[in-house]
């Protein structure tokens, strides 16, 4: 079966679970060939085996939380052919005070490298690519509704997503009229492994009521990307909350975000390291 996107090839980061996996599945169903990357090679291989019945899928296992990894991923992905679509989805957060003993400097650095550094680097390789295929090109960067205000106890994560949003929107404006469209998606709470990994999840009623499935977020994000939209916020409650923060003083928006999220889960944060063999 051919679709209007057949013949394109997408690099999807963080495709081993959650929103990234859902986007990879949807892209494959649309006939888009894939390069999927994350740390867990076994999870990527399992997904690739399923999707290869439909499209060509290359797997690149890499830790984009480490400096230098983005260049390696780009080289490996590009070696297999042109990349027409770049989806910067890999990311993590943690729900703790900045001075919490179990949220150390190494975790901060990994967050900045993954959520910000590698994303920017991959965008740079993509826009500087000297062999464009002549087709329309797309960047889809995953931010969060956390980009719309500061979030106490998720300070660094929210700041990283504010950077992703501002960077993506500026890039969209810079590249307007060119072959490359840049779209930023700002999901609210989405049912994925993100929350357990972040030491979060004991959320208040509003946060729980607005939770969406990874597939619903993927569908909305990809539809916006194909249309070349600048920014999309999936879900009515999420849209209202991002609009609402414009109407109140910034400190109040920050306090409200903290109240909506509730308390971090008790106990130490889950480790960032993967066990031998890769799978959790
Ligand atoms: N879930 C939410 O409520 C929510 C809300 C707003 C925004 N988001 C954003 O959505 C994106 C996807 O998250 P998700 O909700 O789908 O969570 P998820 O299921 O935990 O997926 C995160 C993905 O990122 C990958 N990843 C994590 N650390 C990595 C590293 N160091 N190097 C390479 N890949 C890494 C993970 O794979 P490996 O573990 O195999 O490396 C996984 O594929 C993130 O950017 C997140 O900030 C999520």
Image (tube, grey):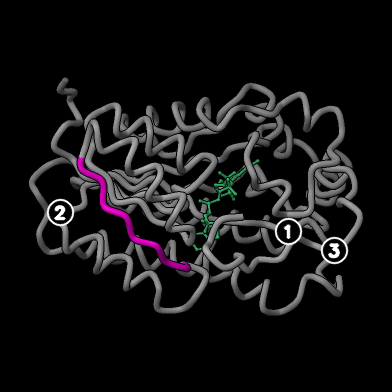
Residue 111 visible to an observer of this rendering: no
Badge 3 or badge 1: first in the primary sequence: 1
**Of the pair 26 and 254, the residue shown nearer to us:** 26
Mark 2 or 3, closer to the camera: 3
| Disc on res. 213 | none
Image quadrant containing the N terminus: top left
**In this rendering, the label closer to the viewer, 3 or 1:** 3
Image quadrant holding the C terminus, namely bottom right
- Residue 246 image point, x, y percent: 70, 39
Question: Could you tell which of marks 2 and 3 lies nearer the N-terminus?
Answer: 2
When the figure is inspected, residue 104 is found, relative to residue 189, above or below; the finding is below
Element type where label 3 sits in the image: loop
In this figure, which residue is indicated by the disc labeled 3?
268
Q: Is 177 situated left or right of 102 in this image? A: left
* Left-right relation of 116 to 266: left
Residue 241's place in the image compared with 173, above or below, is above
Q: Is residue 41 above or below residue 250?
A: below
Residue in the picture at 61% in, 65% down:
275
Q: Nearer the viewer, residue 258 or 178?
A: 258
Q: Residue at coordinates 16% horizontally, 31% vertically from top-left?
A: 6
**Front-most of residues 211 and 37:** 37
Please tell me which residue is depicted at 27% across the width and 45% down the height of the picture. 34
Q: Which residues are magenta?
A: 56-63
Say few, some or many: other residues with alpha carbon within 10 Å of mark 3 (under 14 / 14 to 19 / 20 or more).
Answer: few
From mark 2 to mark 3, how far is it between C-alphas? 43 Å
Q: Residue furthest front?
A: 277
**Is residue 86 shown left or right of residue 218?**
left
């Amino acid at each position: 079966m051919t679709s209007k996107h057949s013949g394109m090839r997408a690099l999807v980061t963080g495709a081993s679970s959650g929103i990234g996996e859902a986007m990879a599945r949807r892209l494959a169903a649309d006939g888009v060939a894939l390069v999927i990357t994350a740390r867990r090679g076994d999870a990527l291989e399992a997904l690739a085996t399923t999707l290869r019945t439909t499209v060509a899928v290359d797997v690149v296992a890499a830790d984009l939380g480490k400096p230098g990894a983005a260049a390696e991923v780009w080289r490996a992905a590009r070696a297999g052919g042109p990349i027409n679509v770049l989806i910067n989805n890999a990311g993590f957060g943690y729900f703790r005070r900045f001075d919490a003993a179990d949220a150390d400097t190494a975790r901060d650095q990994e967050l900045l490298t993954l959520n910000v550094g590698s994303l920017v680097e991959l965008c740079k390789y993509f826009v500087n690519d000297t062999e464009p295929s002549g087709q329309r090109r797309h960047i889809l960067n995953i931010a969060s509704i956390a980009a719309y205000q500061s979030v106490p106890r998720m300070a660094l994560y929210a700041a990283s997503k504010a950077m992703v949003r501002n960077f993506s929107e500026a890039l969209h404006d810079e590249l307007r009229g060119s072959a490359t469209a840049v779209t930023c998606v700002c999901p609210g709470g989405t049912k994925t492994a993100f929350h357990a990994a972040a030491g979060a999840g004991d959320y208040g009623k509003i946060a729980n009521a607005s939770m969406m499935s990874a597939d619903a977020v993927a569908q909305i994000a990809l539809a916006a990307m194909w249309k070349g939209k600048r920014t999309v916020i999936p879900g009515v409650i999420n849209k209202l909350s991002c609009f609402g923060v414009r109407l109140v003083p910034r400190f109040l928006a920050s306090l409200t975000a903290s109240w909506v999220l509730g308390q971090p889960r008790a106990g130490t944060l889950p480790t960032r390291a993967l066990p031998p063999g890769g799978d959790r």
